[in-house]
């Protein structure tokens, strides 16, 4: 049994003086290509890694959720049918939001007592999405609910969007639900279609390395949501300039605007909006090229595109703390690293790299 599974089991036994009825696990994810594009209905790639979130849990027939995290000091508690409708501004907000979103679709009766633990420092590996998915898996199991993968992704996203207040797309949740060992997830966020591209036998050996910056910060309090709005603003303006119907602002995205339209009118956009759009359109092309490189077994080209993606994140998306930028720059000058970039939104956390294990 993995160390963290033993860890949550041990702490559950210490708190409740009995063994947990069940344990569950959700992996963290990395996105080598497709960053900052899912909320604009772009294409993404992803890998799940062998580290993630563990939960040990048992039922509470009175409907109460009582949950502890080994990363945070405060135990959280609410009822499955009456979770607080307003954020409590603590670590468990993601789970309250998930409870509300699930209960809206499937009325809940059974609560749970549980202990959560994550294997790596928080930041850049989509730990928040992994926590939500792990929690939902437990709550559904105890209530006899069998969610489709697409439902699990939708409910997890709703918890972050509507309750926590992060304007994320579905990249994180999709990677953590659909990824499989020795495959690259290649997914179109407009229609949810995806392909698991197997690692070609001819591909040079590689491993996924994670370099942590030491920074931890909440996305909701970062500039993440502003970047999403800048993309929508660019799309809205481009539609207006070109005479396209532009509808509601909150439903506008760059995927609706042809690349040729962007090229024709980009000089009319405010500089920041143009930069965000430049990243999105070039990242879309990099994802498509990267998927083909992976299919061919060309990890050098795939890695080059990932480095290029990281460069665009810094200079067009304008994200990255000084620590993350320095990590990225160091990576680009080290032999044996095929490619890499910030992992996650780039406001905290870590860089990921594809490395030659030799």
Image (cartoon, grey):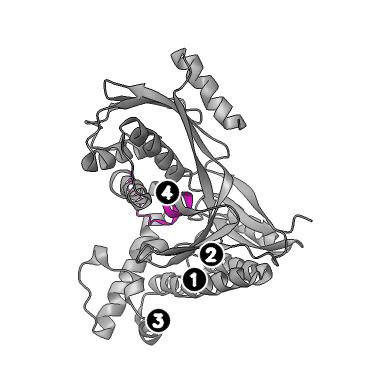
Rounded to the nearest angstrom, the CA distance separating label 1 from label 2 is 7 Å
One can see residue 15 in this view:
yes
* Residue at the spot 23% in from the left edge and 74% down from the top edge: 246
Q: Disc 4 or 3, which lies upstream in sequence?
A: 4
* Residue at the spot 45% in from the left edge and 50% down from the top edge: 177
Q: Nearer the viewer, residue 229 or 30?
A: 30
Q: Is residue 260 above or below residue 45?
A: below
| Image quadrant in which you'd find residue 290 | bottom right
Quadrant in which the C terminus appears: bottom right
Quadrant in which the N terminus appears: top right
* Residue at the spot 65% in from the left edge and 69% down from the top edge: 297
Which circle marks residue 283 in the picture? Answer: 1
**Which element carries disc 2, helix, strand or loop?**
loop
Rounded to the nearest angstrom, the CA distance separating label 2 from label 3 is 19 Å
Q: Disc 1 or 4, which lies upstream in sequence?
A: 4
Instruction: Tell me if label 1 and label 3 are in contact, CB under 8 Å.
Output: no
Eye-nearest disc, 4 or 3: 3
**Which element carries disc 4, helix, strand or loop?**
helix
Instruction: Tell me if label 1 and label 4 are in contact, CB under 8 Å.
Output: no
The residue that mark 2 highlights is 33
Q: Is residue 139 left or right of residue 19?
A: left
Q: Disc 1 or 2, which lies upstream in sequence?
A: 2
Q: Position of residue 295 (x, y in %)?
A: 59, 70
Rounded to the nearest angstrom, the CA distance separating label 1 from label 3 is 12 Å
Q: Disc 2 or 3, which lies upstream in sequence?
A: 2
Eye-nearest disc, 1 or 4: 1
Which circle marks residue 259 in the picture? Answer: 3
What residue range appears in magenta? 164-176
Which circle marks residue 219 in the picture? Answer: 4
Q: Residues within 10 Å of mark 3 (few under 14, many from 20)?
A: some
């Amino acid at each position: 049994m993995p160390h963290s599974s033993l860890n949550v089991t041990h702490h559950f036994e210490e708190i409740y003086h009995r063994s947990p009825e069940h344990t569950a696990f959700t992996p963290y994810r990395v996105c080598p290509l497709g960053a900052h594009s899912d909320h604009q209905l772009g294409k993404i790639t992803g890998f799940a890694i062998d580290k993630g979130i563990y939960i040990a849990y048992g039922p509470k027939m009175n409907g109460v959720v009582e949950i502890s995290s080994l990363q945070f000091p405060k135990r959280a508690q609410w009822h499955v049918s009456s979770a607080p409708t307003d954020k409590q501004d603590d670590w468990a907000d993601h789970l309250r939001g998930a409870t509300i979103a699930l209960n809206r679709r499937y009325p809940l009766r059974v609560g749970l007592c549980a202990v959560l633990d994550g294997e790596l420092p928080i930041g850049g590996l989509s730990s928040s999405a992994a926590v939500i998915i792990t929690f939902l898996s437990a709550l559904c199991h105890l209530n006899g609910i069998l969610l489709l993968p697409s439902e699990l992704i939708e409910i997890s996203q709703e918890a972050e969007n509507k309750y926590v207040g992060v304007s994320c797309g579905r990249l994180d949740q999709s990677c953590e639900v659909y990824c499989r060992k020795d495959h690259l997830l290649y997914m179109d966020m407009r229609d949810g279609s995806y392909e698991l591209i197997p690692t070609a036998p001819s591909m040079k050996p590689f491993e996924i390395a994670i370099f942590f910056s030491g920074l931890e910060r909440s996305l909701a309090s970062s500039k993440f949501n502003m970047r999403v709005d800048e993309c929508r603003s660019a799309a809205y303006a481009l539609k207006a300039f070109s005479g396209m119907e532009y509808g509601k602002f909150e439903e506008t995205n760059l995927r609706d605007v042809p690349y040729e339209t962007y090229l024709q009118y980009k000089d009319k956009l405010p500089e920041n909006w143009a930069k965000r759009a430049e990243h999105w359109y070039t990242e879309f092309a990099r994802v498509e090229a990267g998927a083909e490189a992976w299919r061919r077994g060309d990890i050098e080209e795939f890695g080059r595109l990932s480095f290029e993606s990281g460069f665009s994140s810094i200079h067009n998306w304008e994200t990255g703390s000084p620590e993350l930028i320095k990590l990225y720059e160091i990576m680009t000058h080290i032999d044996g690293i095929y490619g890499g970039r910030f992992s996650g939104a780039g406001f905290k956390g870590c860089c990921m790299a594809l490395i030659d294990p030799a």
